[in-house]
Structure formats: C-alpha cells, structure tokens
Image (cartoon, rainbow, N blue to C red):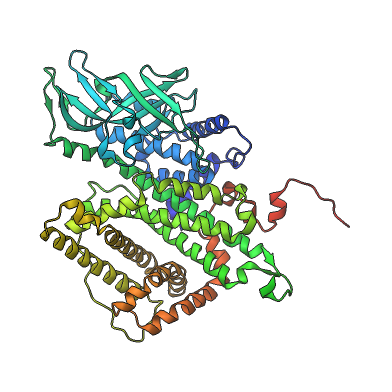
C-alpha cells in the first residue's frame, strides 16, 4: 500500500518503535498511564533529529502518525496535538516572525508539550461561540486572558498530568479599546513541573476509558500574555494603541482562526486509516486460524471460520474498507498544496468524516467477528475503536462536517455537481467501476438539485435561514454523504486503473465489496429513480457472495499487503499459534 519513500523510512520507524518500549500498557494507574504517554512522546522526539518542525517533513510525519496510532492511540492524540496543531498554529499565524523561535525550540525538544484549547464547556464543538477574552493592556503591551464564566471554560484539553510542562494554543476573543476584534490564537504557558502557572486553573477530569488521557478543564483568571505570544497573523496594534487588520471585520477574523483545524483533519485521516488497516488485517488472519465444528458444519471436522460466508462478508468487507481508507490517507499525505482552494478544503474534511465512519465500522466489525478474543484489550480492537469514537467529535463532529460540506455545495463554493447521465437500464456488469461512478454521480446530483429546490422554495415562502435549513438537514447530510461516496469511487478508480489486468480486477473486487455495499444500502432509491432494475437489485446479494468467493483465496495476501507492523500492534490473534502467543504459561509436552 505504501510507496518507495515509506520503504526508505521503514528502518527508522522500526528503530524508534521498539515493540518492547511500545508494548501495550496494562495494570497501570491513571497517572502512570499519562506519564507513560509523555515519556513516549519524548522518546520519539529525541530520535527525530530533524532540526526543523516535523510539519516541514511530511514524508516522515505521516508514517510516524500511522505507527503512533497503531502503537498507542492515546499517544497519537498527544502527538498530533503537539506536532501538528500547536506547532502548526505558530507556523500558520506567526509566519515571517523570529520572536517565537524559542517556543518552537522548546516544542521540538519536548521541553514543553503542546495542547490546543479551542472549544468551551458551554458551546460544545462551536468554535464560533468562544467567550474567553484577551483584553489588550496598552500600558504594559500585554493581554489579560480571562474566563468570564463557567460556559467559557476550555474543555477537554489533555493537560491534567502533574510534572509535565505544558504550553497551549488558546483561542480567545481579542478586545482592544473595548472593541471586539475577533477570534485570535495566543501562546499561553499552562503549567511547569511545579504546577499550573499563575492565573491558570486546571481541574483534572475523569479519563475516558476508550482513550486514556489526562483530560481537564482550564480557565484563566487575569493571566498576563506577552505581546509576542499573540499569533496575530496580519493584524497589529501600534504603540499608540490603534488596531489594524487586513481582514475587514471580527467575523472574518474569527473564521481565520479555524484554519489550523486542517492539521487535525490530515492527522485524523492518516491515523484512522492505520487502525482500520490493522483491525481488518488482524481479524482476517485470525479467522484463518480460528476453527469451529458447530451446527452448520454438521459437526464434521473443524474448519476455519473464514469458510463461512457471513464471516467473509464481514471480514472481506472490513478488508475492502481498509483498502479504501488507505487510498484516502495516501491522497492527503503528499506535499501540502500552496493555498488550498475551497473545494480542496471541503474534500479534506469530508475524507476525515468518511474515514472516521469506516474506522468505527471496521474496528467494531473486526472485534465482533473475532469472538470472545476480539473483546480482549490485548488484541487492540477496543483501543482502535476508542480512537475512532474520539475523532467522531474531534476536529468538528462527523455530522457537522457533512452539513458544512452541504452548505458550501449549496452555495456553489468551488463546486459543480457531476453531470446527470443516468445509465440506461440494460444488461451490464455491476462489478464495473464505471457503473459505480455513474450511479454515485447521479445520486449526488439529484440530491443536490432537490436540496437547492427545497431551500429555494422555503426562502420564497418567507422563512428565515434557520427554518430554511432546519427541515432539510437530513437531505443535506444525505447529499454530502453521496458526494463523499463519489469521491471514494474516484479514488479507487485512480488507484486501480494503472494496475495490470489481473491485479486491477482483484483490486476492483476488493474495493467493490464496500462500494457495492453502499450502493445496495440505497438500492430502493436507485430502483425508484430508474437507475437500477429490479433484477439488478435482486442480484446484489448474490454478487457480494461471488466477490467473497473470488477474494477468499487471496485474503491472507491482501491482509498482509496492508503493510501492518504486526509486532508493533502486538495482537496475539495475529499469530498462527495465537493461543501460545496469548499466554505466558508453560505446558509440558504430553509425550
């Protein structure tokens, strides 16, 4: 699944991620678990030796994100917040300045660990509703950071672990001369080895069992922030106290502060794709070694569960989704485009949303298909499922991302719906990727047309914008999901078209399991629209069975081709002799 650059990086990854150092922790207290997370972060940093921020080395950053996610999902969360969002904020909004170099050096050396403090307790995932204030003091040329009430408390930054120096990127409403100047980011020291910095109130919260981290609430009581710690972008405050900004109003400035979320989307797509690949590969390997001689086998000789068609549909479906997730991760892992367009930004966050859904589905399905051993924490499905659950909300929730996409598409922001060319109902091959493209394109276009028509009629009826959208949110989400599926079809076609015939056919069959499953889920709609015939709809379950039969001889090779470092994952059931791998007990040879 990876290219030559990954192969070149592999020895370095293997040296950093020693299975002994990154074995799955068990039996630790919460505080010991948090401390281990930050010890591992420093261990990785000590061995990078890039000399410049990791964001400038994307060919190394993304493989690291993959391996960190596989080794320790809690560490992945801390790692991307440190290297991507904290450092990224300084590079993004402090570009062209050298007065923050000392902070970048501290972060590079892990003298301090970075955190992002955007969302607030009373406003969920809404970054537009930030109430924290940074009031400019013209005499001291400093900012006074204040939390005005409980609804403005920052939640949930992972900064509760004592003894770990932390620095945060804090979003706050800038007030200059009693005027709101919009939302800006500030570099704020939060705690040192002795405890919270003056005026910073950190209250540890219960850790989520699915993603153990030192979650906390953070509030500010008159915290003094030096002028240079203001990530001012194009804004400035002159010596006479006058404020200037190239952006014309506070609303435009506040939207700019969300630019750094793209680092979350990139990291999430790569990390979630990695745990999706690992879950599918481990479960497929185990299904070849897990034997049963139950009712449906007629109590004959035991046979591996992978022989059962229902297991194949589940596990080969997981394998299919894993390949598609890997293709999506590859599409965001190249050099960063200069000045992403609105359409490219939309594609980025839609991929985050759809890959999170795939990760949640595959980790759960792989766990369930592995029986009681799937529930064992040692086999990692629960860890990986926890990471997927966490990212359903992080970086804006999956549903919000789909609705934001629908809003921009309805406005026509860098978007043209695909041409509506319905495939003629006639004999054709449902395994043909060109047909998948035609079907998904027509669904996207027609849902887009219906959304626009509904919005237009509501506006013509005199409804306000909230009412205009409120009754059409479900349709809007369906349209964005249809767009996401069409993007995945395009990715699959792009990745498979250049392959030799036999490989292309196998790759098409593997990816087709997921894509046909998505088309089948809306078969009633396609039938009603005259895009599929009743015979084709009835043929879909049999076609899925045929695909499973064709994939079965290649399943182990396909699992291993996902490039999962099984020693790092450490799941006992990934091994042929999984019972021995699972226990440390010694059994005498009965002979």
Give the residue furthest to the bottom.
427
Q: Position of residue 415 (x, y in %)?
A: 20, 59
Q: Quadrant of the C terminus?
A: bottom right
Residue 434 visible in the shown view: no
Q: Position of residue 263 (x, y in %)?
A: 34, 43
State the image quarter where residue 448 is shown: bottom left
Horizontal relation, residue 106 to residue 565: left or right = left
Nearer to the camera, 249 or 550: 249
Residue 370 visible in the shown view: yes
Nearer to the camera, 450 or 308: 450
Looking at the image, is 134 positioned above or below residue 573?
above
Horizontal relation, residue 255 to residue 566: left or right = left
State the image quarter where residue 530 is shown: bottom left
Q: Position of residue 300 (x, y in %)?
A: 73, 75
Looking at the image, is 37 positioned above or below residue 7?
above
Looking at the image, is 557 positioned above or below residue 4?
below
């Amino acid at each position: 699944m990876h290219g030559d650059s990954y192969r070149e990086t592999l020895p370095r990854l293997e040296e950093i991620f020693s299975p002994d150092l990154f074995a799955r922790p068990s039996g630790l207290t919460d505080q010991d678990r948090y401390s281990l997370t930050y010890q591992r972060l420093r261990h990785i940093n000590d061995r990078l030796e890039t000399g410049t921020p990791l964001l400038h080395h994307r060919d190394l950053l993304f493989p690291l994100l993959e391996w960190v996610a596989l080794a320790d999902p809690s560490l992945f969360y801390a790692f991307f917040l440190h290297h991507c969002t904290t450092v990224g904020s300084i590079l993004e909004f402090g570009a062209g300045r050298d007065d923050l170099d000392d902070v970048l050096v501290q972060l590079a050396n892990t003298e301090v660990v970075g955190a992002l403090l955007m969302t607030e307790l009373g406003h969920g995932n809404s970054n537009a509703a930030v109430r924290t204030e940074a009031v400019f003091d013209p005499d001291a040329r400093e900012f006074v950071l204040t939390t005005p009430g409980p609804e403005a408390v920052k939640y949930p930054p992972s900064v509760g672990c004592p003894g770990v120096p932390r620095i945060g990127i804090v979003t706050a409403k800038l007030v200059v001369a009693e005027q709101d100047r919009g939302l800006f980011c500030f570099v704020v020291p939060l705690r040192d080895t002795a405890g919270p910095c003056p005026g910073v109130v950190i209250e540890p919260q219960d850790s989520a069992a699915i993603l153990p981290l030192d979650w906390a609430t953070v509030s500010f009581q008159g915290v003094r922030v030096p002028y240079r710690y203001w990530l001012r972008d194009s804004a400035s405050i002159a010596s006479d106290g006058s404020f200037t900004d190239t952006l014309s109003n506070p609303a435009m400035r506040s939207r700019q502060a969300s630019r750094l979320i793209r680092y979350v989307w990139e990291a999430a797509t790569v990390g979630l794709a990695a745990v999706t690949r690992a879950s599918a590969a481990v479960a497929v390997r185990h299904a070849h070694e897990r034997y049963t001689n139950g009712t449906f086998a007629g109590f004959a000789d035991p046979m591996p569960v992978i022989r059962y068609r229902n297991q194949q549909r589940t596990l080969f479906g997981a394998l299919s989704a894993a390949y598609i997730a890997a293709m999506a991760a590859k599409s965001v892992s190249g050099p960063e485009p200069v000045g992403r367009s609105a359409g490219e930004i939309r594609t980025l966050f839609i991929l985050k949303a759809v890959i999170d859904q795939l990760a949640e589905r595959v980790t759960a399905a792989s766990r369930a298909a592995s029986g009681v051993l799937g529930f064992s924490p040692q086999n990692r499905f629960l860890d990986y499922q926890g990471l997927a659950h966490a990212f359903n909300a992080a970086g804006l929730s999956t549903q919000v991302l789909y609705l934001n996409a629908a809003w921009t598409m309805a406005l026509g922001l860098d978007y043209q719906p695909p041409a509506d060319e319905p495939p003629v109902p006639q004999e054709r091959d449902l395994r043909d990727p060109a047909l998948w493209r035609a079907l998904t394109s027509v669904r996207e276009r027609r849902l887009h047309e219906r959304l626009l028509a509904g919005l237009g009629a509501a506006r013509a009826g005199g409804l306000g914008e909230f009412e205009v959208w409120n009754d059409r949110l479900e349709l809007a989400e369906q349209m964005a999901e249809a767009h996401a599926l069409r993007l995945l079809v395009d990715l699959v076609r792009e990745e498979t078209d250049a392959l030799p015939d036999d490989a292309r056919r196998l790759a098409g069959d593997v990816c087709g399991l997921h894509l046909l499953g998505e088309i089948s889920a809306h078969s009633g709609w396609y039938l009603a629209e005259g895009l599929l015939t009743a015979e084709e709809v009835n043929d879909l379950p049999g076609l899925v069975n045929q695909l499973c039969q064709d994939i079965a001889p290649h399943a182990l090779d396909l699992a291993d081709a996902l490039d999962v470092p099984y020693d790092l994952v450490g799941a006992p059931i990934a091994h042929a002799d999984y019972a021995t791998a699972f226990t440390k007990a010694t059994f005498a040879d009965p002979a």
